[in-house]
Image (tube, helix red, strand yellow):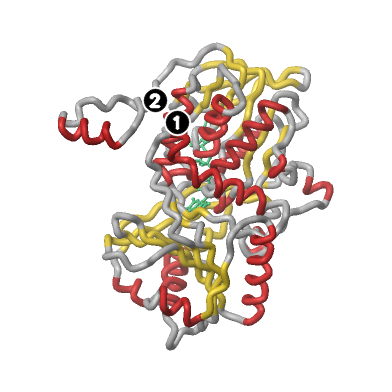
Amino acid sequence: MRFSGFKVIKEALMGHKGWGPQWRNPEPKPHYDIIIIGGGGHGLATAYYLAKEFGQKNIAVLEKGWIGGGNVGRNTTIIRSNYLLDGNEPFYEFSLKLWEGLEQDFNYNAMVSQRGILNLVHSDGQRDAFIRRGNGMILNGADAEYLTAEQIRAECPFLNFDDARFPIKGGLAQRRGGTVRHDAVAWGYARGADQHGVDIIQNCEVTGLRIENGVCKGVETSRGFIGANKVGSCVAGSSSRIMAHANIRLPIESHVLQAFVSEGLKPVIPGVITFGAGHFYVSQSDKGGLVFGGDLDGYNTYAQRGNLPTVEDVCESGMAIMPMIGRARLLRMWGGVMDMSMDGSPIIDKTHIDGLYFNGGWCYGGFKATPASGWCYAHLLAKDEPHEVATAYRLDRFQRGHLIDEKGMGAQPNLH
Ligand SMILES: Cc1cc2nc3c(=O)[nH]c(=O)nc-3n(C[C@H](O)[C@H](O)[C@H](O)COP(=O)(O)OP(=O)(O)OC[C@H]3O[C@@H](n4cnc5c(N)ncnc54)[C@H](O)[C@@H]3O)c2cc1C
């Protein structure tokens, strides 16, 4: 079934009886060419591009819960490509370009909204660092614009300009950044992958990896053994648990990050705004809720819920830049488990075990990476070579000392 304006009108007139399930619910086959562990955004995007762009057939995505139940459906929906370093910026710009054509590509309304992102500046040193980053972005083909405090006041009069503890001195804007409805991304990729013949198997937990003579032969699951020529792990916060089955110790810690949604308000925030003197970011959903978040809870955990001190900390930061947020009631909050690598940048690589591949280390920045991560991981799985924008994301870079330590915009483990 293809979605179109005509179909929506027809269904409205026919009482919405013609919508079918968006993907099949197949039984696992005994063997696949490629198995992706994890039906989050990255796993589903990988399967989609493997089938659509790289001509692979006989693919399964194994998900222990349900599609969209992981971080892909828990994040604060921000997309951007405002990185500094060469190892990162071309990758995230590639991702932003894929977002720009994604809905037409997989024929699904993911509510991609390029409403812009603004990083506030509160000191002279920060201004210099942000302008440097903006120049780095422009050199890599992305868009960046430095705004003065007056320009920001004209666009965002609700920010605290008059008696702020950390005065707003300007900001770095990326107009092509914005938000995307997160769970629709999972559904769109799931539907697209299914249409290309990928088996999406929910409620199927991978409990082990079968490795014989240095070769990965398949996965042990809650529904029995499933063989595969290639196995790709793509499980975000559970990365260290999956790779422990292969005795691989990753340079990754799992942390919980919380997200918050207020009651619906009239449109007030034009795009995404981030606070430069603390950790706080906010946007407004199409339903009117303020969607915001801040720091990680400061301990390692696999639990998908956080604690009250971080709630207080996030709300304090919110009050520091936009005191009006104090009058909005909090409607919902939740947590997700994230995979923080030790330089704050991701990994898309083969392992030393034949047929076993790894994708992870996205921490709190992986949603915006979903299309490029899927594309580059599919490239690696199909061709056994890294995609040109993902060549820096090697697993051994921590041994070689070639870290991609993106100060300013990456997830920085040294801060947590
Ligand atoms: C609160 C919060 C806010 C965030 N905000 C942003 C943001 O604004 N912008 C941004 O770019 N990023 C953000 N992120 C980060 C982003 O959401 C993640 O980096 C990204 O979603 C991770 O990739 P994924 O979608 O594949 O992960 P997930 O959706 O978590 O997918 C992994 C899947 O693997 C499954 N799995 C785990 N173990 C097994 C197993 N043994 N067998 C089978 N399946 C298994 C899980 O059930 C899960 O569905 C945020 C994250 C959180 C938690």
Dot label at residue 23: 2
Quarter of the picture holding the C terminus:
bottom right
Residue at the spot 43% in from the left edge and 59% down from the top edge: 115
Q: Would residue 158 be found to the left or right of residue 35 on screen?
A: left
* Amino acid beneath label 1: Ala
Residue at the spot 72% in from the left edge and 41% down from the top edge: 388
Residue at the spot 55% in from the left edge and 11% down from the top edge: 30
Dot label at residue 190: 1
Marks 1 and 2 in Cβ contact (< 8 Å): yes
- Ligand 1 neighbours mark 2 (CB distance < 8 Å): no
Residue at the spot 53% in from the left edge and 67% down from the top edge: 173
Residue 198, position in %: x, y? 50, 22
In the image, 310 versus 159, the foreground residue is 159
- From this view, report whether residue 150 is shown above or below residue 412: below
| Residue 289, image quadrant | bottom left
Structural distance between the alpha carbons of marks 1 and 2 = 7 Å
Disc 1 crowd rating (10 Å Cα; few below 14, some 14-19, many 20+) is many
Residue reaching furthest to the top:
30
Residue reaching furthest to the bottom:
163
Quarter of the picture holding the N terminus:
top left
> In this orientation, does residue 74 appear?
yes
Residue 272, position in %: x, y? 45, 63
Disc 2 crowd rating (10 Å Cα; few below 14, some 14-19, many 20+) is some
In the image, 128 versus 356, the foreground residue is 128
- From this view, report whether residue 287 is shown above or below residue 395: below
* Amino acid beneath label 2: Trp
Secondary structure under tag 2 reads: loop
